[in-house]
Image (spheres, rainbow, N blue to C red):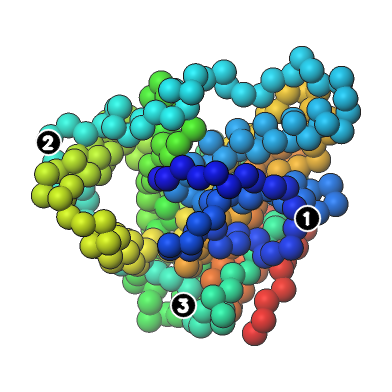
Amino acid sequence: MEDTDIMPKVTKENDRICPLLYVPAKTMLHYQVTYFGKKINLDIFHALTDGTGGMEFLNIIVLDYLKLRYPGEYTEVTIHSGASAGDLNQDSYRQFFGNKNLSRGPVQKKAAHPGGLKLPYNQLQFFEIKMPVSQVLPKAKALKVSLTSFPGAAWMMAIRDEMPPRKRNLPVTISLPVNLRNYYPSQTARNFFNSVNVTHTFDKDISLEELAVEFDVTLKSQLTEENIKKQMDNFETMEYVAPVRAVPLFIKQLVVRHFTRKSNKKVSMVFSNMGIQKPPASIGEKIENYNGFCSTNTLFSTMFSYKDNLTLGFSSAYLNTGVVKNFVRGLVNSGVDIRVYATEVIK
């Protein structure tokens, strides 16, 4: 990262969702704040921070807006975690991981993908999927699974329904980002997350309810501190191996891109649950809802819970919209009221 003297400026929304925020050799800020009507957008390049850091920044921006909009009304309200500048800038990966005992993790197989043509002109299509928490949470509780596992299983079923019969032997793998601050005492605003995978091969008939229970068991088995630490030690130790550190940056970038492509082949989609949003009550009265999207080369869904709103942001690089249709129809058939919005694309 390099310092810059460029000052950010709030502007009216005039670009697509997830605009390009990094161009090699071009001097530019890697985040931007825009608005449209009563909607405030924070677009941020993932190298700067993860979802947790981004959400804290967004809430600070919202509070500052409200202080300007209603002078004197929010002078006693704070959102910031109160962490020092050093804590916010801490490299928590280096702080908590990196012992020298490298070990190989389980071998991941190539995963099923919806396939088909990608959208032309490097486009992405975005869908906002809204449903009541009060209709989904009881279904998860009845199965004794988390609010991540129920829609996670629904995404698996949606992908399966787009798979041709000859590819039904391939596993469907959902990658789920994990906020490591829930496991280690860190207040960093930098990236501090890991990803775990949940996999299922549809070699026999299974209901959404049965799959949700299986998804939940697998996810919880992955989310042990021992498993997370072993995986993160491997990643972090590699960064500080002397031969790796000596490799020129442009070669490292080529290698990273190569392994990113290989890794992407082992994941059907990414599903990131951003959890329950809990701004202070006084500003929560002014906030209608939260939602977010992430850029992707395949499929990516976020999920936000706020008041009685369960909102999913779905990003797709594919021309075919079958996966999102299957997901919505599956939940509607189980008795959930859903409203969907979509961006237009050039076909």
Q: Position of residue 183 (x, y in %)?
A: 40, 27
> Which three-letter amino acid code belongs to the residue tagged 3?
Gly
Determine whether the residue tagged by mark 1 lies in a helix, strand or loop: strand
The residue located at (56%, 80%) in the rendering is 121
Q: Quadrant of residue 182?
A: top left
Residue type for callout 2: Asn
Q: Secondary structure at mark 2?
A: loop
Relative to 205, is 283 on the left or the right?
A: right
What is the quadrant of the N terminus in the image?
A: top left
Q: Give the mark nearest the N terminus, 2 or 1.
A: 1
304 versus 81 height, above or below = below
In x, y percent, where is residue 20? Answer: 56, 62
- Residue 139 makes an appearance in the image: no
Camera-near label (2 vs 1) is 1
- Seen at 57% across and 18% down, the residue is 82
Q: Position of residue 23 (x, y in %)?
A: 48, 63
Q: Amino acid at mark 1?
A: Lys
The residue located at (72%, 66%) in the rendering is 342
Question: Mark 3, mark 1: which one is toward the viewer?
Answer: 1
Residue 125, given in percent of the width and then of the height, sits at 63, 69
Say if 144 sits above or below 340 in the image: above
Q: List the residue tagged with mark 3.
A: 115
* Residue at mark 1: 12
Res 6 seen here: yes
